[in-house]
Image (cartoon, rainbow, N blue to C red):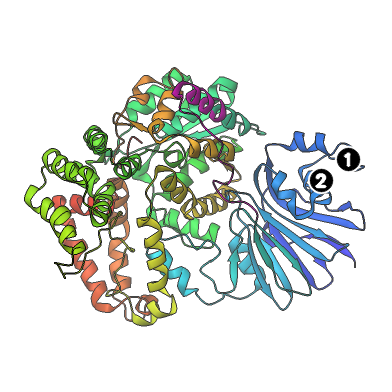
Amino acid sequence: MKHAFSIFTDASLIRQAGDRFLLLHTSDVHGSALGQEGANGPLYTVGSVRLDNADELKAQMEDDANALTSLDSVIQSAYQRWNDMCVDHLQGDYAFGLWDDSKGELFCARDRLGIRPLYYHRNSEGLWFSNNLRVLLSSVGYLPEVNKKRAMQFLQGIESESSLTFFEGVFRLPASHSLRYSTSGEPAVKRYWHLGQDIPAVGDNLDENVERFRELFIGSVRKRLPSSGPVAIELSGGHDSSAICASAVRFDKTRLKTYSAVFPSNAECDESEFIDSVVEEAGVHNVSVNTDTLSVTDFYDQSILAHGDCHHAANIRIVMRIQELASADSCSVILNGVDGDNVASHGLYRLAELATQGDWETFIREVKAVADIYEAFDDEPEVGLYNKFGKAILKEKTDRALSIESIKAVFLLSKHFGLNRKSMVKQYLVKPTLRRWGLLKTPNKKTTQAPAWQGRYSEDELTQSFIAESDHVNFSKAHYNSIKSIRTEREAQMFALGNGVLEAYFEYTHSISEKYGVETRYPFMDVELMDFCLGLPANHKLDNGWTRLILRASMKGIYPEKIRTRRGKSNLAASIGNAVTGQCFADLKSAALDADEEIWQYFKPASVVSMIERHDALENDPLLAQKSRRKSGQSGASGAG
């Protein structure tokens, strides 16, 4: 079979194998135009790849006859040596496709955390694949129908079904999966790695763990610094971006540029004093991005055009403007601190662990110590923390048996949190006992560990056909059960890091990065660092009211003390809400009330009118709006920041 590479539209690389087309669009293609000779025939590779262990792999394969002069040749040699299991040996961010001519097969893989995206579509011509959804759709040649299941999950804010796109028949290869395809069959998708499968044994010596965290984190920053130009850092003034900046300057201060969003019209979002302290101590040049000048609609439209799929990032205008400025300053790499919150962890599920262990005195002490952070979410933060992390566990215990622990817990909790003692005694001690003795026939109401949240829209607001076609009832029940079953800090971290939200963020950020010719890298998204943090004892994440304890302790003397000891983080929800309502809500209302709009496939007309009326009421009542943000968890003050 003859093989030829040629340039396709929009800087895409396309390889023709007879009448089959295998495509990967990327701004930094590591493609072998001539291929590499395998044992029984040539190998062809296209991909977007950054490997942390390229030198180690080259050393392992030095006896190979192939000259390992590029990343694609390293991947090809790894494939020749280990076949599908080559992905077990690759460390870094990657999405690639490799054609094995001897087998007539295509092998694709995506990195463990899904930093680099990969999409595919099977039709009568063969398998089309790309790391840019929009380019893949344009190559397919027609616009597929909307995938209703994906549309429902998007509206409900759920991202766990990570193989779906908005388009029927067009799929994303999930993180930590590979795909094998031959022209005679269907794509076979296989998972090769699970988050948490390699958690190391971690001791309970805090000093040793602090030293190990520091080593892993600073090493992760160092691995992500190499670039052909200056390196940009998105600096917000929070713990994560400050830790990245302070660690990066230890290696090469002269190549660093920082960029920070400022909010002149929203004083509650102001992080200037923290940003300035990092910039001054690090000795770097910082560029301020005035969010008041950024159009929500313009940037969101641009992001959709770049990405090809919808996303939830209301503040995407900030990310895009920083990338635009960094590109103009010749930066080829941007370091982003996304989700250090969940890697190092706020540690709040230690409270659930304490309740499960029956250590209610420590539970109460930690709740009181951390309540000032949680007050952004609840008017009565101590009661809110008890309801979220202890109430269901207490009920499970008292439903099983009457014990000294349960009696003590009821009286302690009612005393310290101001709960009605008589009601607590009746609910948790008397009724369960009578029910076990068969003297009470009333049903036992279940108390959920997590808030009874199954999405942003109720079934009363959505059309019955949309609910049925999207299988919403079964899916939301499974999703909700996975949340309410969380009882430990490790389980909470695993859920937060693996529920698909991060994967979606990486995908649209990658598409936007390509638009500006830069590459976004994530120092907290290091598999070894994440595994270590998952192995940490819960009290190394939350202790005496200090959330994110391991990060704070490891950064002592590295980033400013003002950052290390800060309790909360500014509320960015006001900026997002004000920008959206101020710039585009009138247009949204007009479109929503248009009888010809496609929205009526999904929403009942009365429910849309009701939503608009609720919004107008919030606009006229700032206090009500604040309470609404708290209830929906959109305050932006998720712990210590």
Q: Is residue 529 above or below residue 511?
A: above
Q: Considering the image in quadrants, where does the N terminus appear?
A: bottom right
Q: Residue at x 31, y 72 (%)?
A: 592
For mark 2, does the 10 Å Cα neighbourhood hold few (<14), some (14 to 19), or many (20 or more) residues? many
- Mark 2: which secondary structure? helix
Q: Earlier in the sequence, mark 2 or mark 1?
A: 1
Residue 384 visible within the image: yes
CB-based contact (under 8 Å), mark 2 and mark 1: yes
Q: Is residue 359 above or below residue 253?
A: below
Q: CA distance from mark 2 to mark 1?
A: 8 Å
Q: Which residue is mark 1?
A: 67
Tell me residue 279's x, y (percent): 43, 23
- Mark sitting on residue 73: 2
Q: Is residue 334 above or below residue 215?
A: below
Q: Residue at x 51, y 33 (%)?
A: 233
Residue 14 visible within the image: no
Q: Look at label 2 and name its amino acid.
A: Ser
The stretch of residues the image draws in magenta is 192-217
